[in-house]
Image: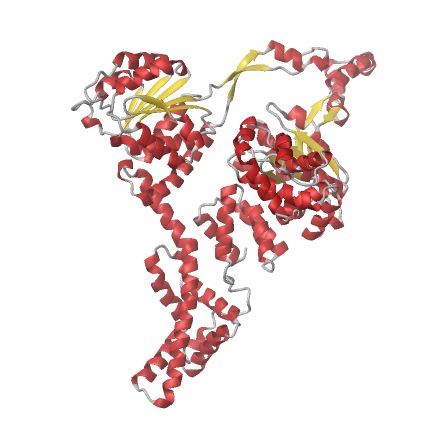
């Protein structure tokens, strides 16, 4: 496979599109058919072969434009043998002249030659390993050295040290050429950073972010988290959307068998077995949205809403004292606006868990049956009000499972006005939840019960 | 795969532009990605998976391609519970049963001349395969497509509606263009069919399936394309009305509605407007015929207030 293509595929993978080896081979076959000639045609064709979802197509188009914005192929233009480095020894006027004419040529509209040389030099300088923006100047310098800037600079230094009217013009020319070259190289290095460095940095940062405590998120992290959460949700969805039905071996479905064999005079050639339909997950999420835990509630809801295709039977409630059904704002508004609305409308009262459970029992008790998993997110601090353990216990008996996510560490449960220890007695599972990974694990566990 | 004969050299498949032209002769307005997909599908021998909203011409592409290339069209409509006996092949049990009855008397003759049990068994064994031969096999669309002598288009419609088990079954057919029947062996496609799968995104398809396919996404058309499509499908429409209705539909898609109208609805609406002898788009006319474009009552209610504005702006386009 040619180097440009494999480098393009590496850039795609760095940007988060999953490209398998098989798809890479297909791309090579496409390239053999279409060639580099018509860029827009190649883009369309690559997008058919390499990107298999809508988000991946968006990534592909962006990376393609970035990657092929400059003539990226060193081998596309016939440049002299790169290994022929003997020129370096006989340094001096001829090489300076060569570089100068190259740069001058670019100014005169013949940019391809220069770009190809830069691309090649940048590759020898290892620019594709770039990771951080602070490395850009370093790689610019390395690339220029690969192109043989040294003799030119030596000559420039000589001229500047012994200035004379005759050489003034030459010095100006040399300086201008050097600056022009540097500009071009910088564009190239910057492009490579966008392709290879930035995605790598991003994915590193989101790996860090998903493990960080949710309470301490900056606004820059929030955007990153959204992408990470979407990815985690997709993982959960693929894991749990498999196998809706389980054949129970050996139990004959008599009616089904007769129906299937009607065309054979009811002689049972095909046996139809009974199967159990797997329960669809039904999840009732109850989130404390008072100021102390609102950030965690935000992410739990983000997760659940990213999983809407898998969890079709989802009810969401928010409370600080009274309980509100928040399906309507989440369904109609964009997620961020919905969250802002919920926090503003329902998050201001003083926390009262007992009241919330009483409201649930009054209005939505029928949602909770033996198929339901109740997810509760909160710190269990109920401001000395009646925690209504009787209702909580009844809920726990009605539901399949009750999972409590508590943002406080276990050491602080039961201190002050915390009722966590009392609630814990009746919950199926209580977990300390600080990061996005914890939330993922809790939801995974909730869905695990529906096998 | 190497064993298969080369594909029939059809001029229409020679280049991307040729495909666009061929599709246009049967009234399908193609775009660059669509034609490229068919071109690559033919030359790389890969199936095309088409995704996109309902009514943008996914199924129609397969039907039109078959028509334009003069290929046989084999269609497999997917649904929940579709299995190999409906998609691949089935044994003709009735016929087998009938033959057993007919041949019953003959068995006496065959076995009569033998002396020992072993010999009789040996004789019978040589007839065993008779009942599980090609004559007793009922070919379903996938197997039919493998057996086509000339080129064919195999349309696997709404593959997302089928079960995951069926998806797995498709893999062999799509990757190697062959069907394995345990009793007979592997049947290799004589001429690999042009395979087109469509999906409405009811569920996410498996990665294994996607990796074997070219992936084409057809979205809602832009104004220029939509104009061409409607003109091709409803030639009787006047240019004024066409420009106005396309502008209206384009604007309507930007509104906050659950199920935006797609190209199929635009074409229906164009036909409706002609039937109503409309020469201009006016608000009353739009109000009366809106149910052709929007299929949900909630959507119709949602845009009620915007109708005067939308139809006025559509009229101003000309």
Q: Residue at 34% across / 27% down in the picture?
A: A442
User: Where is residue B318 shown, x and y percent of the image?
Assistant: 64, 48
x then y, percent, for residue A156: 35, 80
Which residue: 70% across, 46% down? B239
**On-image quarter of the N terminus of chain A:** bottom right
Q: Judge whether A427 appears above or below A12 on screen.
A: above
Horizontal relation, residue A89 to residue B213: left or right: left
Residue B82 picture location, percent across and down? 62, 24
Find residue B259 and report its horizontal and vertical position in percent. 56, 33
Whether residue A436 is visible to the viewer of this picture, yes or no, is: yes
Q: Name the quarter where the C terminus of chain A is drawn.
A: top left
How did the renderer colour the structure?
secondary structure
Residue B44, compared with residue A358, is above or below; it is: below
| Viewer-side residue, B280 vs A225 | B280
Q: Is residue A123 left or right of residue A379?
A: right
Q: Nearer the viewer, residue B231 or B216?
A: B231
Which residue is depicted at the point 29% across and 43% down?
A218
Relative side of A275 to A281, left or right: right
Left or right: residue A249 versus residue A328 is right
Out of A83 and B253, give the one closest to the viewer: B253
Can I make out residue A9 in this image? no
């Amino acid at each position: 496979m040619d180097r440009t293509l494999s480098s393009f595929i590496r850039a795609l993978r760095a940007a988060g599109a999953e490209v398998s080896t098989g798809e890479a081979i297909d791309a090579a076959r496409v390239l053999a058919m279409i060639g580099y000639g018509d860029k827009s045609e190649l883009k369309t064709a690559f997008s058919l072969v390499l990107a298999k979802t809508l988000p991946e197509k968006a990534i592909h188009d962006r990376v393609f434009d970035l990657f092929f914005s400059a003539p990226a192929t060193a081998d596309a233009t016939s440049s002299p043998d790169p290994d022929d480095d003997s020129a370096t020894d006989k340094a001096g006027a001829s090489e300076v002249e060569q570089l100068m004419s190259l740069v001058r040529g670019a100014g005169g509209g013949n940019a391809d030659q220069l770009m190809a040389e830069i691309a090649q030099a940048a590759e020898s300088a290892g620019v594709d390993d770039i990771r951080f923006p602070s490395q850009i100047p370093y790689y610019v310098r390395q690339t220029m050295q690969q192109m043989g800037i040294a003799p030119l600079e030596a000559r420039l230094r000589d001229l500047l040290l012994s200035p004379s009217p005759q050489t003034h013009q030459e010095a100006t020319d040399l300086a201008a050429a050097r600056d022009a070259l540097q500009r071009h190289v910088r564009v190239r290095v910057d492009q490579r950073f966008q392709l290879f460095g930035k995605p790598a940095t991003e994915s590193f940062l989101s790996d860090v972010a998903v493990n960080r405590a949710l309470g301490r998120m900056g606004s820059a992290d929030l955007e990153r988290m959204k992408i990470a959460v979407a990815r985690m949700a997709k993982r959960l969805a693929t894991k749990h959307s498999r196998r809706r039905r389980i054949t129970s071996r050996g139990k004959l479905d008599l009616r089904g068998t007769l129906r299937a064999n009607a065309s054979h005079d009811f002689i049972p050639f095909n046996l139809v077995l009974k199967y159990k339909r797997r329960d669809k997950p039904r999840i009732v999420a109850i989130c404390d949205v008072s100021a102390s835990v609102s950030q965690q509630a935000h992410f739990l809801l983000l997760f659940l809403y990213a999983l809407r295709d898998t969890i079709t039977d989802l009810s969401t409630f928010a409370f600080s004292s009274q309980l509100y059904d928040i399906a309507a704002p989440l369904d109609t508004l964009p997620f961020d606006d919905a969250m802002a609305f919920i926090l503003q409308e329902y998050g201001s009262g003083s926390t009262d868990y007992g009241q919330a459970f009483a409201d649930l029992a009054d209005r939505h008790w029928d949602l909770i049956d033996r198929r339901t998993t109740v997810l509760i997110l909160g710190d269990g601090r109920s401001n000395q009000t009646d925690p209504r353990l009787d209702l909580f216990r009844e809920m726990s008996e009605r539901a399949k499972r009750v999972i409590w996510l508590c943002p406080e560490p276990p050491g602080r449960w039961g201190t002050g006005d915390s009722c966590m220890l009392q609630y814990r007695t009746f919950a199926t599972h209580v977990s300390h939840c600080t990061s996005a990974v914890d939330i993922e694990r809790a939801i995974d566990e909730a869905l695990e019960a529906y096998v | 795969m190497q064993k298969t004969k080369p594909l029939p050299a059809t001029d229409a498949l020679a280049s991307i532009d040729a495909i666009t032209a061929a599709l246009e002769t049967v009234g399908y307005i193609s775009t660059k990605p669509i034609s490229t997909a068919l071109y690559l599908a033919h030359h790389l021998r890969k199936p095309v998976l088409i995704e996109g909203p309902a009514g943008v011409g996914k199924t129609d592409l397969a039907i039109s391609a078959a028509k334009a290339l003069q290929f046989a069209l084999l269609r497999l409509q997917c649904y929940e519970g579709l299995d190999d006996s409906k998609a691949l092949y089935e044994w003709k049990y009735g016929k087998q049963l009938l033959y057993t009855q007919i041949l019953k008397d003959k068995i006496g003759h065959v076995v009569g001349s033998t002396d020992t049990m072993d010999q009789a068994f040996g004789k019978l064994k040589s007839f065993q395969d008779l009942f599980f031969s090609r004559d007793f096999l009922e070919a379903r669309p996938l197997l039919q497509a493998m057996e086509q002598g000339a080129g064919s288009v195999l349309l696997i419609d709404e593959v997302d509606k089928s079960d995951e088990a069926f998806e797995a079954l498709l893999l062999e057919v799509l990757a190697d263009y062959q069907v394995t029947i345990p009793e007979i062996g592997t049947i290799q496609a004589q001429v690999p069919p042009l395979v087109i799968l469509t999906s409405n995104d009811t569920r996410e398809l498996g990665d294994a399936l996607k990796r074997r396919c070219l992936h084409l996404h057809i979205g809602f058309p832009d104004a220029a394309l939509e104009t061409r499509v409607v003109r091709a499908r409803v030639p009787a429409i006047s240019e004024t009305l066409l420009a106005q209705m396309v502008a209206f539909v384009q604007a309507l898609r930007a509104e906050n509605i659950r199920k935006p109208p797609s190209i199929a609805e635009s074409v229906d609406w164009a036909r409706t407007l002609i039937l109503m002898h409309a020469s201009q788009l006016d608000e009353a006319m739009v109000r009366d015929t809106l149910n052709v474009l929007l299929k949900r009552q909630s959507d119709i209610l949602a845009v009620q207030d915007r109708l005067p504005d939308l139809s006025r702006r559509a009229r101003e386009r000309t």
